[in-house]
Amino acid sequence: LFEIPTLTALYQLGKLSPCETTETPNAIYNDKISLIRNDITKLEVDAIVNAANESLLGGGGVDGAIHRAAGPRLVRECEKLDGCPTGDAKITHAYNLPCKAVIHAVGPVYYTSKRQNMHTNFLQSCYRRSLQLAVKHGLKSIAFSALSTGIYGYPSEEAAVTALDEVRGFLEQGEGDSLERIVFCSFTEKDEKAYEKYVPEFFPPV
Ligand code: AR6
């Protein structure tokens, strides 16, 4: 993972340098946060986070790509999980993928959940539940796809802010001490730009 050029480039730019002082508390987590723009199915991290739907039976977007790359045993395991409500996540094996586990998070459909003023809560809880599952299962590195920002219509910047805020809160509360790396994996330019814009705000470089 560390040899992928975009990530290396970010380190060279000093955007993700680890913090050597605790004067800016948020910055101590910089050495755990990475941005990458890539196909998440290629990442050799412990867990990748899928943008699933409530059925957990596959679909388009990153969900389709993950199921194709994992092979048919993934859907067979998913069939046994009895779905997953919006805002929650469930974990499975990764089968033919290079990661060790897949965490299937069900993000909100933006316009529907916004009408109920639940969009932020649902997206926050997807990130929190995914991180909790990773910790519970002893997984040390986790890569998130940009949940809900594709077919589900969540604006990229608003989604990135919510994701970064939730991950920072999780680390600040000490819940993620066992996690060594948290990767935000973008696929499109708009998501990549949103993360590049807001990572320094939530995890300021020193
Ligand atoms: N690697 C990383 N990110 C990807 C990949 C990939 N291979 N392919 C797409 N993305 P989406 P949603 C990005 O639409 O909005 C499915 O049908 C994509 O650019 O996959 O949460 C599910 O079954 C976007 O930034 O998920 C649900 O029914 C992000 O992944 C529904 O779509 C999420 O886009 C979920 O919609």
Image (tube, rainbow, N blue to C red):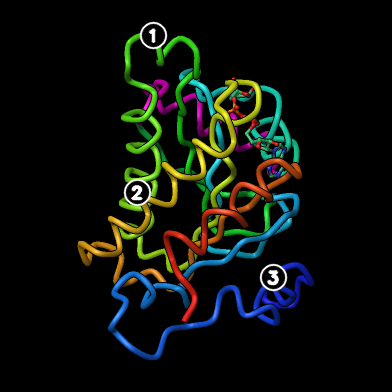
Label 2: few (<14), some (14–19) or many (≥20) C-alpha neighbours in 10 Å: some
Task: Identify the amino acid type marked 1.
Answer: Arg
Residue 184 image offset from top left, x and y in percent? 57, 54
Of the two numbered discs 3 and 1 on the same chain, state the one appearing first in sequence: 3
Q: Is 138 in front, or is 50?
A: 50
Residue, disc 2: 166
* Secondary structure of residue under mark 2: helix
Dot 3: what SS?
helix
Quadrant containing ligand 1 = top right
Magenta highlight range: 70-87
Could you tell me the amino acid type at mark 2? Answer: Glu
Please give the name of the residue rendered at 63% of the width and 49% of the height, measured from the top-left corner. 95
How far apart in space, not on screen, are marks 1 and 2 (Cα)? 22 Å
Q: What residue type is labelled 3?
A: Leu
In the displayed structure, 180 sits above or below 108; it is below
Residue 77 magenta-drawn? yes
Location of mark 3 (residue): 7
**Residue placed at 42% from the left, 21% from the top?**
83
Expressed as whole percent of the image width and height from the top left, the position of residue 65 reads 73, 37
Give the percent coordinates (x, y) of residue 18.
Answer: 48, 83
What residue is disc 1 on? 115
Q: Where on the picture, by quarter, is residue 29?
A: bottom left
**Pointer 3 local density, CA inside 10 Å: few below 14, some 14–19, many at least 20:** some
Q: Who's the residue at 67% across and 60% down the image?
A: 36
Q: Which mark is residue 194?
A: none
Q: How crowded is mark 1: few (under 14 residues within 10 Å), some or many (20 or more)?
A: few
